[in-house]
């Protein structure tokens, strides 16, 4: 019963977590008005730093539906829990996420231990695998993984593909141009 009511709100949160790499707290505090023209105007809760994040195209349909639901329930918050027609509180969000994860684990067992914060880490790892510079990844996440080795190893998993690209790029015989 609860899980059926929670799929739209939880889907929106998961989409923002995996494709835009933001913290659960920031997703739950997000206001409908913060989302305009394909961007999210965000002040991050952890460090208070501001960003105007371009939303991933796969997130936009979720945002459009979430905005409509929020407006229909006369709420300012973007993500409204369908079970109460009110914003999630952290404890309720964790319980519903756990139920959704449990259902998903029946199909893909490896997600059985997934935590919401792992979505943010997946964003960073996928960005690195796509060849995105670590400074740019740090800008998206709002942290300093580009200059902090501990954060870097926590957020960006080692990648055989990245290592292979590095090996392929090594050419000691290439003519070097002094700058």
Image (cartoon, rainbow, N blue to C red):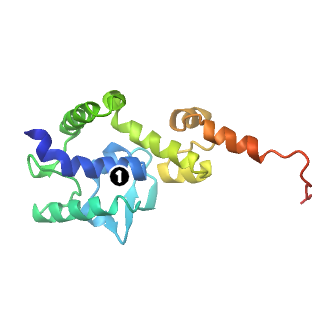
> Furthest-bottom residue in view?
37
Where does residue 76 sit, x and y in percent of width and height?
19, 61
Q: Residue at x 88, y 44 (%)?
A: 172
Q: Residues within 10 Å of mark 1 (few under 14, many from 20)?
A: many
Q: Is residue 85 left or right of residue 88?
A: left
Report the label total: 1
Q: Is residue 92 left or right of residue 51?
A: left
Where does residue 173 sit, x and y in percent of width and height?
91, 48
User: Which quarter of the figure has residue 176?
Assistant: bottom right
Q: Is residue 76 above or below residue 159?
A: below
Q: Residue at x 27, y 66 (%)?
A: 33
Q: Residue at x 28, y 31 (%)?
A: 105
Q: Is residue 37 above or below residue 42?
A: below
Do we see residue 22 in this rendering?
no
User: Which quarter of the figure has residue 97?
Assistant: top left
Q: Quadrant of the C terminus?
A: bottom right
Where does residue 88 sit, x and y in percent of width and height?
19, 45
Q: Is residue 173 above or below residue 54?
A: above
Q: Residue at x 72, y 43 (%)?
A: 166
Identify the residue under disc 1.
Answer: 16
Do we see residue 40 in this rendering?
yes
Q: Quadrant of the N terminus?
A: top left
Label 1: which secondary element: helix
Q: Is residue 114 left or right of residue 173?
A: left
User: Which quarter of the figure has residue 62?
Assistant: bottom left
Q: Nearer the viewer, residue 75 or 6?
A: 6
Q: Is residue 36 above or below residue 140?
A: below
Where does residue 19 sit, x and y in percent of width and height?
41, 52
């Amino acid at each position: 019963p609860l899980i059926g009511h929670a799929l739209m709100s939880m889907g929106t949160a998961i989409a923002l977590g995996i494709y835009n790499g933001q913290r659960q707290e920031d997703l739950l505090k997000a206001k409908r008005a913060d989302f305009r023209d394909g961007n999210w105007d965000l002040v991050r809760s952890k460090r208070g730093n501001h960003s105007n994040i371009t939303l991933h195209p796969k997130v936009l349909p979720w945002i459009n539906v979430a905005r409509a639901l929020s407006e229909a329930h006369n709420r300012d918050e973007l993500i409204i829990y369908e079970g109460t027609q009110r914003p999630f509180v952290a404890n309720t969000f964790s319980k519903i996420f756990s139920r959704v994860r449990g259902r998903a684990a029946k199909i893909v067992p490896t997600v059985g231990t997934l935590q919401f914060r792992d979505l943010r880490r997946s964003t960073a790892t996928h960005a690195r695998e796509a060849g995105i510079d670590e400074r740019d990844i740090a800008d998206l996440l709002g942290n300093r993984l580009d200059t902090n080795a501990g954060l870097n190893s926590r957020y960006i998993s080692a990648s055989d593909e990245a290592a292979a690209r590095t090996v392929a790029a090594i050419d000691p015989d290439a003519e070097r141009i002094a700058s």
